Amino acid sequence: MTKEKWQRARSDLQKQERIDTALEAAGTLFDEMLYEDITLAQVAKEAGFTRSNLYLYFQNKDELYLHLMQVEIVKWWQDIEYHFDQQKPCEPDNYARFWVDILLQHNRLLRLVALPFTLLEKHASIEKLVEFKKTVHQIMEQHAELLESCFSFRDEGAAHTFYLASIAVASGLYSMTHHTLKQQQAMTMLEMSFTPPPYRQMLQNAIESLLRSSLN
């Protein structure tokens, strides 16, 4: 799509196609750049839009990336559902390995959830924020049902608590073990040596521990 050929979307299908194009462009840039270095102008150029065209669908960068996170969460959940039905990982150690294996296939999502949620949510419109929260809540409910089909939890809310704790641990450990270039430069200037611990094994151990502590 080129700017010269741009025409305002008339149907819901056309609007969704424009949104999908913008999200694809945003994802491509996010895979290559730090979030703080990306601008809406760059996203628009990557998508073949003008910046004013992009504002028809997203009012700012944070709102755009909140929507991208929503899309990536859905993709991750679809993978969880599909492979869970195939593997039935109904032992804590097997589930932890399964969960981490799937998550590590979604590196873009890992980087997105490592961003402060308050930053993205603060600048989103109430409509986009409600849509995001609704999607996340639905996936949490479905994930809890999936877990309860395999495990006997100690109380009614334990599966939900485990889900939220798992996301928090995955996000926190990712930030701790994946330093930016600026962080690495600061460590070098201070003559501090730091070898990040293995993310995969740390996360797998943490997920297994969280799950065991949630069960009867």
Image (cartoon, rainbow, N blue to C red):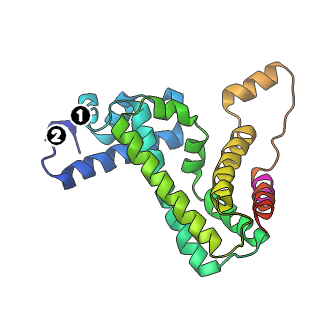
Residue 104 sits in which quadrant? Answer: bottom right
**Amino acid type for the residue under numbered disc 1:** Asn
Q: Looking at the image, how many numbered discs can be counted on the residues?
A: 2
Q: Are marks 1 and 2 in contact (CB under 8 Å)?
A: yes
Magenta stretch encompasses residue 204: yes
- What residue do we see at 62% from left, 76% from top? 149
What's the distance in space between the residues labelled 1 and 2, CA to CA? 9 Å
Residue 22 in view here: yes
Residue 46 sits in which quadrant? Answer: top left
- What residue do we see at 70% from left, 73% from top? 151
Task: Looking at the picture, tell me which residue is in the foreground, 137 or 96.
Answer: 137
Furthest toward the top, the residue is 189
Tell me if 116 is positioned left or right of 25 in this view: right
What residue is shown with label 1? 53
Residue 70 place in picture, x, y as percent: 45, 49
Residue 194 place in picture, x, y as percent: 85, 34
Q: Secondary structure at mark 2?
A: loop
Tell me if 93 is positioned left or right of 57 in this view: right
Task: Looking at the picture, tell me which residue is in the foreground, 43 or 199.
Answer: 199
Magenta stretch encompasses residue 102: no
What residue is shown with label 2? 6
Q: Is residue 149 above or below residue 24?
A: below
Which stretch is magenta?
201-205
Residue 171 place in picture, x, y as percent: 66, 44
Q: Quadrant of the C terminus?
A: bottom right
Q: Residues within 10 Å of mark 1 (few under 14, many from 20)?
A: some
- The dot on residue 42 is none
